[in-house]
Image: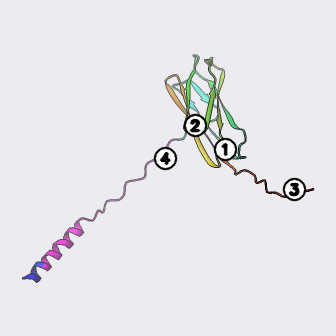
Amino acid sequence: MNKILIITGAALFSTCVLFAQNNTPPPPPPPPAPAPTQAAPESGIKFNEVVHNFGQVEYNSDVKFTFEFKNISNEPVAIKDVGTSCGCTTPSYSKEPVAPGKTGSVTAKYDSSRIGAFTKTLTVYINNDQIKLMIRGTVLPPKSDNTPQSK
């Protein structure tokens, strides 16, 4: 009788394990995040570029870039604010409204006292829209002072 119970239990267990297998394929990966765009039709401005790569920069050097934009609307546009993805990036921007057909700018300054690769985002709030700007690069380690000096 014990053998029959053991065999029946083993058969029942194996059946449960077989039916517990999930043969559905995994879901597809999520789509990549959209890249920043140069124009924001709702805001009425168009940037010359929205991603700037500094490449390799020296430690503690002056790392800044100015993104320029043109007002492509029929009305003046004004930047309300510029936010950054961290405190290592300092923005400055055109404070006065930019007339139709004229240009304005957003400048990003990066603190290059942090060694390694960086990718930082600036969010420009203009009219009722947001435009993402991006800076990236790599800060090289400081040069060693152990180099032999000639006499």
Amino acid at the residue labelled 4: Pro
User: Which mark is in front, 1 or 4?
Assistant: 1
Which disc number belongs to residue 20?
none
Q: CA distance from mark 2 to mark 4?
A: 26 Å
User: Which mark is in front, 3 or 2?
Assistant: 3
Nearer to me, 143 or 18:
143
Q: Which residue is mark 3?
A: 149
Q: CA distance from mark 3 to mark 1?
A: 26 Å
- Dot 3 alpha-carbon crowd within 10 angstroms: few under 14, some 14 to 19, many 20 or more: few
x, y percentage for residue 57?
71, 46
x, y percentage for residue 97?
60, 17
- Sequence order check: which comes first, mark 1 or mark 4? 4
Residue stretch rendered in magenta on the structure = 6-34
- Sequence order check: which comes first, mark 2 or mark 4? 4
- Residue at 22% x, 66% y: name it: 19
Image quadrant where residue 94 sits: top right
- Sequence order check: which comes first, mark 2 or mark 1? 2
Give the SS element for disc 2. Answer: loop
Q: Which residue is mark 4?
A: 32
- On the rendered image, what quadrant is the N terminus found in? bottom left
- Residue at 29% x, 62% y: name it: 22
Q: Which residue is mark 2?
A: 87
x, y percentage for residue 70?
63, 25
